[in-house]
Every structure is written in C-alpha cells, then in structure tokens.
Amino acid sequence: MVITQKSTMKTEVIFSEDKEHRYLLRKEWDKKKKKAMIIMKNPSDGEELIQDIASLLVVNNLVRLDFGSVDILNLYSKVNTRRFSDMERDKEDIKINNSYIEKSAVGADIIILAWGSGCSTNKKAAERQQAVLELLVEHKGKLVVIEDKKGRTGFHPLSPQVRQGWKLKKLYEENK
C-alpha cells in the first residue's frame, strides 16, 4: 500500500528596507496547534525560501514536540555578522527588534530562550540578554530553555547535544 502525505508551510519574513536586518521569521505548518517563539543571537541568511540550518533544526524539533508554528527572533537583528560591535551599532534597529519581540510574545504559548552560551562572555551581549528578559517580564511563565539529555541548559539549536531532540525546561519554576 502507498500513502501520500501533503502539507504546506507558510513563511513570513520581516526585514529592514535594505535587508540588513531581519526582525521576524515566521513559519506555520498547522495553525490549530500551539505556537512557539524562539529567540536566538542574530539571524543568518534564512528567509522565505532559503533555509538556514538553525531555522531548519528549530522547525524539525518543534514539529516533534507537536507545535504548529514558530516565530524566530533574535537578540540582534543584524543579518550574518559575528561581531557584537556590529550588532550593537544601530540603536533604532534594536528598538524595532524589541517591538517585534514584544508583539510575538503576546501570541506565543511558549518562549524559548536559545541564544546559547557565547553571549555570556561579552559584557554588551549579556546586557542585551538582560534587556530582553526585562521586555518579557510579563511573560515569565512562558519562558523555557533547551535542555540536553544530561539536564544541562542554555543551548543554541546548532549545539550538537540538542540538534536531534529537545526537551524544554521552564526557566522559572512557578510557586506552588
């Protein structure tokens, strides 16, 4: 017996006019299921048709966890840069990026903090992480991190320990 399966993935991307900043990458494959939001460090060249590896891993793992869509956002909106000084340069883009983070958080069932550990060694990046956490304070109960099989947390989706399977752990334990 042969079985045919079909599906459609809807993609929306919001860029700056010059396409040097990506504020939001939204992927939806089943609007009846839960919606995730993930915040990583900064965007690569992923867009409506070009898939980057991080976004691919995000979607694959969220499908396995029975989600139906994801908003992919970042601490910084500057596309394809590795230097924190380049990411911090334009304060107006940070304000715009913040507005997309806040808007997305409202509609998300969970918010995955997946910027990895690389930001912790840079003072400006650590400050940016703290600023984003303050933006999300009213959504504290939705905040989760990716946990590996050994119970360690704080991973980026590209980390080898979590590429093939995620466990999501609440960042803040709720008072009982």
Image (cartoon, rainbow, N blue to C red):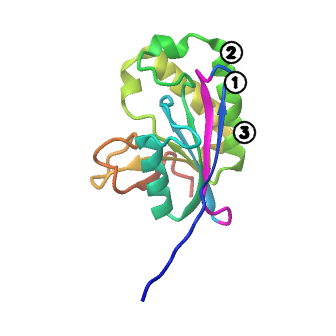
Residue 46, image x, y percentages: 51, 37
Compare marks 3 and 1 and give the one earlier in the sequence: 1
Check disc 2 and give the amino acid type.
Glu
Counting other residues with Cα less than 10 Å from the Cα at mark 3, is it few (<14), some (14-19), or many (20 or more)? few
Q: Which mark is residue 162?
A: none
Quarter that holds the C terminus: bottom right
Q: Disc 2 on helix, strand or loop?
A: helix
Q: Disc 1 on helix, strand or loop?
A: helix
Distance between mark 3 and mark 1 Cα atoms: 11 Å
Toward the bottom, the furthest residue is 1
On screen, residue 170 above or below 32: above
Distance between mark 3 and mark 2 Cα atoms: 17 Å
The picture quadrant where one finds residue 98 is top right
Counting other residues with Cα less than 10 Å from the Cα at mark 1, is it few (<14), some (14-19), or many (20 or more)? some
Q: Disc 3 on helix, strand or loop?
A: helix
Residue topped by disc 3: 103
Counting other residues with Cα less than 10 Å from the Cα at mark 2, is it few (<14), some (14-19), or many (20 or more)? few
Check disc 3 and give the amino acid type.
Lys
Q: Which mark is residue 92?
A: 2
Residue positioned 54% across, 28% down in the render: 75
Distance between mark 2 and mark 1 Cα atoms: 6 Å
Q: Which mark is residue 96?
A: 1
Tell me which segment is drawn in magenta. Answer: 19-32
In the rendered structure, the answer to whether residue 60 lies left or right of residue 23 reads: left
Check disc 1 and give the amino acid type.
Ile
Q: Tell whether label 2 touches label 3 (CB within 8 Å).
A: no
Residue 45, image x, y percentages: 49, 32
Residue 67, image x, y percentages: 56, 61
In front here: 151 or 161? 161
